[in-house]
Image (cartoon, rainbow, N blue to C red):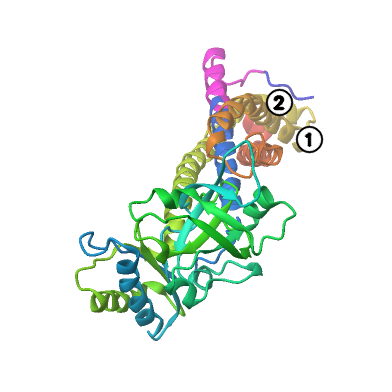
Amino acid sequence: PLRDSGKGTSGGFRHRKLRDAVVVLEVALSLALLVGSGLLMRSFVALRAVDLGLSPDHVLVARLPLPADRYKTAPQIAGFYRPLLARLKALPGVVEATETSTLPPYGGIRSEVEVDGKTDPEKWTAVVQLCSEGYFGVVRIQFLEGRTFTEAEVEGARKVAVINQTFVRKYLGRLNPIGQRIRVAELANFPDKVADPWFEVIGVVKDAKNQGLEDPPLPEAWVPYTVTGSGERGILVRTAGDPLLMLNAVRREIWATDHNVALTFTGSLEGFISEFSYAGPRFALVMTGVFAGIGLILVTIGVYSVIAYAASRQTHEIGIRMALGAERADVLKLVLRMGARLVVLGLAIGLLVSLGVSRAIASQLWGVSPYDPATLASVAAVLLVTGLVACWVPARRATRVDPLVALRYE
């Protein structure tokens, strides 16, 4: 059989070992980078597949900081938003519009809550939103029981509330939620405070994300925005087409209502979710992907170069073996074995390095284990195939050696 020795062995034991070590290092580092990139890719795909519980497409967002000297109380706030919402709903291309205190799905007012007739040694908390009757039609959160606010309830600042599934599960248990009374303590602490902030539950909606995309929903309650004049305010407008194309028309209606009110933080809800929740993971994925791709290219070039050089230095030995009856398949196996040995050694070291890389990026992963076996196996397979393909060209070239020419090669 053919052996990795002979007159044509690559010059210098020390130089050969150095070249081999460089290839092994390239494979190991490429594996670690590809594993990191693969984990981030799987995490990003999982994040994009998260069910928000609401529909962010075709929704225009605008924050409206009202002049504090003119809009201090709930009636003053309502005096601006009621005509504005009526104007917006009358615009061609607008499906629904609502006032909102918070941009979903990014939290709200944190408040301690109580349920009438129930006590608990621990303080209960919930996320609270101030909104108008059109809110659920804009964001399209599904109702499970009951109903949303009526226009009369909002205009009259009635103390009614809609709650989510998590609120029911954690605080109401088997009680029928409709008709229960809940106390939203934080509303009593506002500058324009709500006296006796007890609200009657009139509806239950499906859970929607309210703490970003990665965390499970917290208990949540929605109450009419007209109960208080405190807190930041804005609008959400559902449109039939591209919401950004409606921005100028919406701006005109705002100025027609009060020319002293400016828009800030404008854009599409889909765009804000992409910016706030996807931009960071996407950037990390692109950066690791670029370095991993460079590493893969270097592995291919490195393995090819080392094996091609080694094969060329063994031309004399190959000629002798073929002259003595060695088959081309034996020569092919010899050259492939040289490359495979380096690649497999690099993979073994790379797997150990990748464990450290996975641990380092664990905090950036969502929906995938940092030690995901499918990612490790697939990346190792890709590198192994890449290494063998890089060996194939010099191996095939070695099988075409003319024994008579090789015997004269020094």
Q: Nearer the viewer, residue 139 or 293?
A: 139
Question: Circle 1 — which element?
Answer: loop
Magenta range: 6-24
Q: Is residue 63 magenta?
A: no
Which residue was labeled with disc 2?
320
Mark 1 vs mark 2: in front? 1
The quadrant the N terminus occupies is: top right
- Residue ID at (57%, 62%): 200
Quarter-wise, where is residue 266 in the image?
bottom left
Q: How far apart in space, not on screen, are marks 1 and 2 (Cα)? A: 12 Å
Residue 293: percent from left, percent from top: 51, 43
Residue 359: percent from left, percent from top: 58, 29
Residue 331: percent from left, percent from top: 72, 33
Question: Circle 2 — which element?
Answer: helix
For badge 1, the amino acid type reads Glu
Which residue was labeled with disc 1?
327
Residue 21 placement, left or right of 172: left
